Structure formats: C-alpha cells, structure tokens
Amino acid sequence: MPEKIVLKDADVPAIADIDIYLKHGGYAAVRKALKEHSPEQITEMVKASRLRGRGGAGFPTGVKWSFLPKNVWPHYLVCNADEGEPGTFKDREIIEKLPHELIEAMIITSYAIGANQSFIYIRGEYVRAAHILSKALAQAREKGFLGQNILGSGFDLDIVLHSGAGSYECGEETALLESLEGKRGMPRVKPPYPASYGLYGKPTVINNVETLANIPHIVLNGPEWFASIGTPKSTGTRIFCVSGHVNKPGNYELPMGITLRDLIYEYAGGVRNGHRLKAVIPGGSSSPVMTADQLDTPLDFESIAAAGSSLGSAGVIVMDETTDMVRVALRLTQFYAHESCGKCTPCRIGTRRMVDILQRMVRGKGKPGDLDRLEALGQTMKNGSLCGLGQTALNPVIGTMRHFRDEYEWYMKK
C-alpha cells in the first residue's frame, strides 16, 4: 500500500484524543508555521505544492487564498464539511478519526489568510462526527491551540462549529454562506465571489475537509515533497470513496494518477460475485458515467476530464453488468429533483421534468421524442442553472444516454 498522507494515522487507537494526537506529532505543523513562517510564506508554500481543491472543482488552493484583498477586513475561513454528494464519505472518516488534523489545518490556514474567526459547516446528518469535532475543539482551546496569543505568536483564532439542516444544496459554497448567516440555503449570483464578498460580505476562503487536511503535512515536509507525489498537475494523494458492486468498499488514499483498474481490482477487491464491470462513476453521482473500456484511465483531474467525466469528490461508484442504467439515471435524478433549492427555474423544473419522463419510460409509456427532450432539458439546465447542482444534475441522464443509449431505446419499445 502506498504511503498515506491525510489518513496515515487514522488507525492509531484513540488518535481523536488530543494527548494521543500530540504524542504522534500533532500540532507540530502549527508550531512550525507560527514560529518559522510568515502568512505570505505559508501561502507561497501551498502554491508551490500545487495542491488542488478536493471538494469537486479542483482549483489550486494557494491561488484561491491569494485572491483575498489586503485592504478589506476581517477575513474568514470556512471549512465545508457538508459532505452530501452520493457516493462520497471521505470527510466523515477524517473528522471522526482525525479531528485534530482538521483543526490544526484550520489554524495554519487561518494564519495564512489573516483570519481570526473561522467556521466549520458540517452536514446535519453527521451527528457523531459533529460530537467528536466539538470535543476536539474544546480540547484544543484547553491546550492553548485556540484562543488568544496562540503559542505566544500574537495570533488569535476561534473556530465555530455549525451544523446544517441536512440540505445537499448547502454544499455549494455560496448557499453554505447564506445558511451560515441564518438565511435559506440558496446560491448567490456570482460574481462577486466569496474571496471578495463572502461571509457577512467580507473576504472569505472556503475549503473542504480533505483539502485542508493536507496543509499540516505540506508545512512539515515541504511543498517539493508533496508535489513529487501523484502527477505534475494533480499532485499528492486522493481519498477515493469506493462503493457499489465491489468486494471491499471503503476509503482508499492513493497517489493521484492511479488507474481505475488498479483502484477497483488491486485495492477494492474487484467486482463482486464474479460479475463483469459495466460502468463506473468516478467523482460522485454528479460526474458523468464511464465504461469498462475506460478502466485504464488515470485518476487525475486532466485524464478524467479528457475521458468525458470529472474527478469531482472522488466518490467512485462501481456497477456490474446486472445494472439497469436507465433506472440508475432515474434514481439519481430523483435525488437532485428532491434536493434542488428551487431558486432557479432550469434546475427546479428541469430536474422534475427529467424525472417525469424517466418514470414514464420505465413504466413502458415512453413517447416519441422523449430522448430528444431529455437532451434538450439537459442543455437548458447546463446553460441556465445558477449553481453546480443544476449544471451537473443532468449528468446521470446525459452520461448514461451517451454510453448506453440502447437501454433507453429498449424502454421506448416496451
């Protein structure tokens, strides 16, 4: 098994307790960052590592930090722990097993961007994770890693934990900010972007849990070390959440650039019950489906995009030859129709109309032109939706139609 970064201490007994975490080198990166580096040096270090966001978009993390204006204060850091993408469960493991790694990362990041108040927005359903994180935050305050004049550095920071109400839409960064401010979780029109107009109208950095969890390791080991792992443009490791028709589902932290074939057959134990692989969703349910003949595609941002999909949240959903792809598309589209916040018409109506057409088809009541209607709806949603939910909710339908159109046509003939 290749060397892990984020999850390397995940199996240490009781590592969620601060005393055990400290015995295994915990908070050493905070000491190094605050005592040896300026905020600007930390930002440049993260830029040099070429760490890209692990939440979905894959934007360079250090570049994102550098967008904050230097003449508008205060700055805020918000950790996006609203992990609601179907097929994705990596952030939960980080929080439940290594809460202090996340807190340490947030201290360093807050120092780098000049934030004295930071927030963790956690998914409402993650009750156990929130309890563990709340206890860890209290321990960090007690040990002097949060509060005023941390480690005598003159840097002050408090972190607030906020539980959402169970809305997938609040994983979208501006909807998250609206919810954090006490409003309905609906996306804002962009621009302005959060870097200039974020939480309470102030400059804000939003990073997800896995992205942040890499920061202490970059500070301790150097950006060159991190950049040497993975591929030149997709550096470091990635936690792949493997689920579906495999023998060993779970989280696998592996270097970026490993192939789908190796992930599924070498690490996840292959397809269960001796079946053949039919399709894979590589980046959570909103990523377009890939087929068995694409198994040798490297799992990095560029290669997956070139294959017609996206690495997204790295939720790898495996499906064998018994899978009905039309029903997969229907089930996933039902999820997006249910979770649409309703603010914009293309998403609110488009997802519902897609569900109506697919339900009619699986009941054997498809109408001439239904496939064209699905494609037209998808294009309208992609071009006209306000946020990523509506812009990608079409992917389960359009992606499966691209590769498995014969299954749709079979339903049309019933």
Image: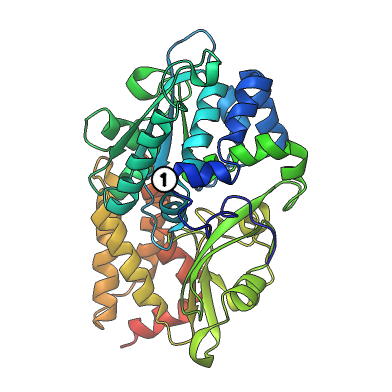
Q: Which residue is drawn at 43% across and 45% down?
A: 383
Q: So how many labels did they put on this image?
A: 1
Side of 206 where 61 appears, left or right: right
Side of 408 where 260 appears, left or right: right
Quarter of the image with the N terminus in it? bottom right
In this orientation, does residue 259 appear? yes
Side of 66 where 168 appears, left or right: left
Q: Residue at x 48, y 66 (%)?
A: 399
Question: How busy is the neighbourhood of tag 1: few (under 14 within 10 Å), some, or many (20 plus)?
Answer: some
Position in image of residue 279 (x %, y %)? 52, 75
Q: Which of 125 and 150 is in front in this view?
A: 150
Residue 156's place in the image compared with 5, above or below, is: above
Q: Which amino acid does label 1 sit on?
A: Gly
Residue 294's place in the image compared with 61, above or below, is: below
Residue 276's place in the image compared with 300, above or below, is: below
Quarter of the image with the C terminus in it? bottom left
Q: Residue at x 58, y 50 (%)?
A: 6
| Residue that mark 1 sits on | 388
Q: Which residue is drawn at 49% across and 33% down?
A: 106
Residue lying at the far bottom of the rendered structure: 274
Q: Which of 229 and 411 is in front in this view?
A: 229
Residue lying at the far top of the rendered structure: 71
Position in image of residue 93 (x %, y %)? 45, 56
Position in image of residue 218 (x %, y %)? 67, 38
Position in image of residue 253 (x %, y %)? 59, 59
Occupied quadrant, residue 137: top left
What colour scheme was applied to this rendering of the protein? rainbow
In this orientation, does residue 187 appear? no
Q: Is mark 1 on a helix, strand or loop?
A: helix
